[in-house]
Image (cartoon, rainbow, N blue to C red):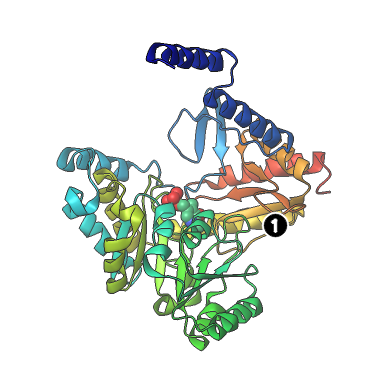
């Protein structure tokens, strides 16, 4: 075939592929539209509601107002005037972006100061910042452990913890959710297989059930079987414990927890960013080897400096954490009086209202929203089949009146749907 002929053949093949809608791009798009229809017919399609106001306990969605009971804005700091001012000032003093990873030219004085501040808050030696807690979890295990080691993880741990463990070559053991005899069984197995390091990994507070890892018992097992403990405190920092230092504070085992990861994207202002804190040699190793740290941009200066302010606020007063606990207690008490079946523990700000039925949970959430109370129904596959629920998240910034309005709306829809009498 001469050059001209082969060129023409090539052109005609291309145009044919384009005209019959069989190009790789079109085939992939067709495949995706089938995937999406399957998700829709399974009833698990996730719609996004557009908020036109700042995040707060009362928000505007286009023109509709609603009380927000489904954000992670546990301390009401997302729209706090002091924090907004600090962020504005930092834009002037330290600029907008870093345009670099940390080890090249992405470290400012405020990044180092925040790391020290976080380490002090958790009584740890050093801290490493990440763009998110997802990255903190994704970057921990692979950097430190290999096939000589064993990771023993709660089945209900967060997706990012699960993914982080998957990225690493260590032997993996999963124990049934907060089941301590199963954890002990898995620790025995890991010991029997001669693991060099054993690491027990758990969320401090579990986001779908609103329950806590039983740290007193986990610590005892870790000591018996010589294991490290890695705790993801994303739903606990600023929330659990008298001073908001999290699940270890609640159980009085702060010294016994080896590593804590957490997020700045929830109670701590809700912007973004995550961290891992623990022994300095380990944090130093992570700075050298942790891939999301090495190969992803440094956190925004305004967030770094404003986060220092958040920790200073928590260090100087327990008022927000105390208010949050009072709000949780008010909501739980009123809902229990009405006869709702609540899951979870009063120490967390997550209150799942158990409804069992998938369709009921979705409808319940939608009808609450129509009445101006923004809560979301969760069903399979986010929670196990037949365990659907509406999840409420309480904030320190909810007023008593707002909480009682939510309770009255739950009462109205609950009666209508014959869930309560
Ligand atoms: C939200 C959450 C994360 C992710 O935090 P980001 O900073 O938003 O990436 C990780 N772990 C747990 C347990 C969480 O709840």
Q: Is residue 67 left or right of residue 96?
A: right
Q: Is residue 335 left or right of residue 415?
A: left
The residue lying at 62 percent from left, 33 percent from top is: 372
In the picture, residue 361 is in which quadrant? top right
Vertical placement of residue 49 versus 335, above or below: above
Q: Is residue 83 left or right of residue 350?
A: left
Q: Nearer the viewer, residue 320 or 362?
A: 362
| Dot 1 crowding, Cα within 10 Å, few <14, some 14–19, many 20+ | some
**Most extreme residue toward the bottom, as rendered?**
224
Pinpoint residue 13: horizontal percent, then vertical percent. 52, 16
According to the picture, the residue beneath numbered tag 1 turns out to be 342
Q: Evaluate whether residue 224 shows in this view.
A: yes
The residue lying at 19 percent from left, 39 percent from top is: 95
The residue lying at 65 percent from left, 80 percent from top is: 181
Q: Evaluate whether residue 241 shows in this view.
A: no
Element on which disc 1 rests: loop
Pinpoint residue 87: horizontal percent, then vertical percent. 27, 42
Vertical placement of residue 70 versus 278, above or below: above
Q: Across the whole image, how many numbered discs are drawn on residues? A: 1
Q: Is residue 230 left or right of residue 383?
A: left
Q: Quadrant of the N terminus?
A: top left
Pinpoint residue 151: horizontal percent, then vertical percent. 51, 71
**Most extreme residue toward the front, as rendered?**
1
Q: Nearer the viewer, residue 40 or 29?
A: 29
Pinpoint residue 358: horizontal percent, then vertical percent. 76, 45
The residue lying at 70 percent from left, 35 percent from top is: 38
Q: Nearer the viewer, residue 220 or 280?
A: 280
Vertical placement of residue 299 versus 245, above or below: above
């Amino acid at each position: 075939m001469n050059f001209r002929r082969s060129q023409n053949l090539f052109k005609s093949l291309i145009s044919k592929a384009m005209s019959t809608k069989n190009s790789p791009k079109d085939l992939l798009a067709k495949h995706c539209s089938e995937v999406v229809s399957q998700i829709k017919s399974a009833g698990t399609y996730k719609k996004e509601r557009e908020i036109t106001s700042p995040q707060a306990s009362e928000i505007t969605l286009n023109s509709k107002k609603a009380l927000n009971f489904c954000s992670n804005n546990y301390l009401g700091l997302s729209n706090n005037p002091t924090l907004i001012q600090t962020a504005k000032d930092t834009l002037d003093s330290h600029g907008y972006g870093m345009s670099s990873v940390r080890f090249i030219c992405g470290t400012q004085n405020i990044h180092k100061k925040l790391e020290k501040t976080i380490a002090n808050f958790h009584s740890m030696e050093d801290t490493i910042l990440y763009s998110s807690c997802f990255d903190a979890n994704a970057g921990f295990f692979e950097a430190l452990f290999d096939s000589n080691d064993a990771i023993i993880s709660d089945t209900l741990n967060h997706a990012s913890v699960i993914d982080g463990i998957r990225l690493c070559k260590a032997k993996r053991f999963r124990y049934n959710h907060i089941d301590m005899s199963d954890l002990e069984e898995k620790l025995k197995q890991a010991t029997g297989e001669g693991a060099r390091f054993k690491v027990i990994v758990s969320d401090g507070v579990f986001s779908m059930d609103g329950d806590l890892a039983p740290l007193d018992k986990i610590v005892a097992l870790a000591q018996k079987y010589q294991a490290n403990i890695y705790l993801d405190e994303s739903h606990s920092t600023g929330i659990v414990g008298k001073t908001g230092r999290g699940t270890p504070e609640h159980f009085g085992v702060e010294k016994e927890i080896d590593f804590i990861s957490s997020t700045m994207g929830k109670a701590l202002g809700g912007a973004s960013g995550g961290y891992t804190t623990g022994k300095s040699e380990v944090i130093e190793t992570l700075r050298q080897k942790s891939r999301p740290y090495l190969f992803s941009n440094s956190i925004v200066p305004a967030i770094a400096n404003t986060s220092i302010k958040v920790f200073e606020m928590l260090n100087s007063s327990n008022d927000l954490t105390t208010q949050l606990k009072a709000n949780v207690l008010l909501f739980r008490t009123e809902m229990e009086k009405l006869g709702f079946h609540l899951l979870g523990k009063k120490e967390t700000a997550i209150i799942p209202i158990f409804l069992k039925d998938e369709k009921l949970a979705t409808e319940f959430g939608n009808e609450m929203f129509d009445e101006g109370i923004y809560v979301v129904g969760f069903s399979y596959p986010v929670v196990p089949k037949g365990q659907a629920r509406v999840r409420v998240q309480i904030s320190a910034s909810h007023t008593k009146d707002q909480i009682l309005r939510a309770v009255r709306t739950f009462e109205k829809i609950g009666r209508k749907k014959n869930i309560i009498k």
